[in-house]
């Protein structure tokens, strides 16, 4: 590996956007992630550097123009925390009538996702390497999303860390602003305690209707490809809980 600092290397440093109060003091944010130090392989770096034009989107403080980006007006599904991105690319490939935007802060995952998207030649996928809560707040127009996917988000198991869980009432409120009518929220987790927390939060919103026949979780749907973390959970004997709600 050479010492040249490329676009992909710099990206990691801009994942977290520093914010300041009105009087110029640094605002400490509770983030839903800790940047892992996982090595960006030469292949992932090259994939990111060479294909960002085709597959990458950068943070911006005005809404993206989805029809200009995708060249069509198909519904846009946003996935937060796609990990290595294999299941996201598979979904994009299986649903050519939808557009997908994946957000991930882990650069090796972004590189791996782009590599797989290039291999599969998907045209309906773009990736963003930035904190999803800031993208939702600043770069996504209200009523513009067909759905939100959140698969196996970091469970933050210890009670003192629960505040770092991405699923919180304020987060869902923001998601609801961004979803079009009939838009979906699909979550999955292998932590029962987080599943119950998700259910409790989603139930607080009268605009959302639970699609579960039993009023809680849905059976694992075939259309959700197995993800890396799900597979890891399975090996440890974890269960899986899927939640599927529609915005009215
Ligand atoms: C436990 S992993 C699951 C990855 C993948 N969905 C899977 O099932 O294999 C959660 C991922 O969410 C990402 N993540 C957490 N908070 C995020 C945020 N605010 N914005 C973007 N990505 C985030 C983490 O970097 C991590 O890769």
Image: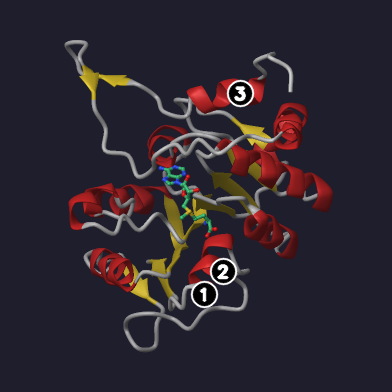
Residue 118 is marked as none
Q: Nearer the viewer, residue 163 or 5?
A: 5
Name above or below for residue 221 compared with residue 15. below
Q: Quadrant of residue 221?
A: bottom right
Crowd around label 1: few <14 · some 14–19 · many ≥20 (10 Å) = few
Which residue is tagged 2? 231
Q: Quadrant of the N terminus?
A: top right
Upstream in the sequence, badge 1 or badge 3?
3
Q: Position of residue 146 (x, y in %)?
A: 52, 57
Q: Position of residue 87 (x, y in %)?
A: 64, 60
Q: Quadrant of residue 57?
A: top right
Q: CA distance from mark 2 to mark 3?
A: 29 Å
Horizontal relation, residue 118 to residue 85: left or right: right
Residue 9 is marked as 3
Q: Nearer the viewer, residue 124 or 233?
A: 233
Residue 234 is marked as 1
Circles 2 and 1 in contact, beta carbons < 8 Å: yes
Q: Position of residue 193 (x, y in %)?
A: 28, 70
Determine if the C-beta at disc 2 is less than 8 A from ligand 1.
Answer: yes
Name above or below for residue 192 compared with residue 115. below
Crowd around label 3: few <14 · some 14–19 · many ≥20 (10 Å) = some
Q: CA distance from mark 1 to mark 3?
A: 33 Å
SS category of the residue bearing label 1 = helix
Q: Quadrant of the C terminus?
A: bottom left
Q: Position of residue 176 (x, y in %)?
A: 35, 54
Can residue 193 be seen by looking at this rendering? yes
Horizontal relation, residue 154 to residue 122: left or right: left
SS category of the residue bearing label 2 = helix
Q: Nearer the viewer, residue 56 or 174?
A: 56
């Amino acid at each position: 590996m050479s010492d040249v600092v490329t676009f992909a290397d710099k990206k990691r440093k801009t994942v977290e956007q520093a914010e300041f109060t009105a009087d110029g003091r640094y605002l400490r944010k509770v983030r839903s992630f800790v940047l892992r130090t996982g090595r960006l392989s030469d292949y992932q770096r090259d994939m990111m550097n060479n294909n960002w034009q085709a597959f990458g989107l950068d943070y911006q403080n005005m809404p993206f123009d989805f029809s200009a980006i995708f060249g069509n007006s198909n519904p846009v599904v946003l996935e937060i925390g796609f990990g290595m991105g294999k299941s996201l690319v598979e979904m994009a490939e299986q649903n050519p009538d939808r557009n997908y935007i994946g957000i991930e802060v882990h650069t090796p995952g972004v590189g791996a996702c782009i590599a797989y998207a290039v291999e599969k030649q998907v045209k309906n996928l773009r990736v963003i390497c930035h904190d999803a809560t800031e993208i939702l707040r600043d770069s996504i127009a209200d009523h513009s999303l067909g759905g939100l996917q959140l698969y196996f988000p970091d469970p933050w198991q210890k009670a003192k860390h629960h505040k770092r869980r991405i699923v919180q009432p304020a987060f869902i409120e923001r998601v609801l602003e961004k979803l079009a009518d009939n838009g979906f929220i699909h979550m999955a987790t292998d932590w029962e305690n987080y599943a119950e927390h998700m259910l409790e939060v989603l139930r607080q919103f009268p605009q959302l209707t639970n699609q579960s026949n039993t009023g809680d979780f849905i059976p694992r749907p075939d259309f959700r490809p197995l993800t890396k973390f799900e597979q890891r959970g399975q090996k440890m004997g974890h269960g899986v809980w899927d939640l599927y709600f529609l915005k009215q």
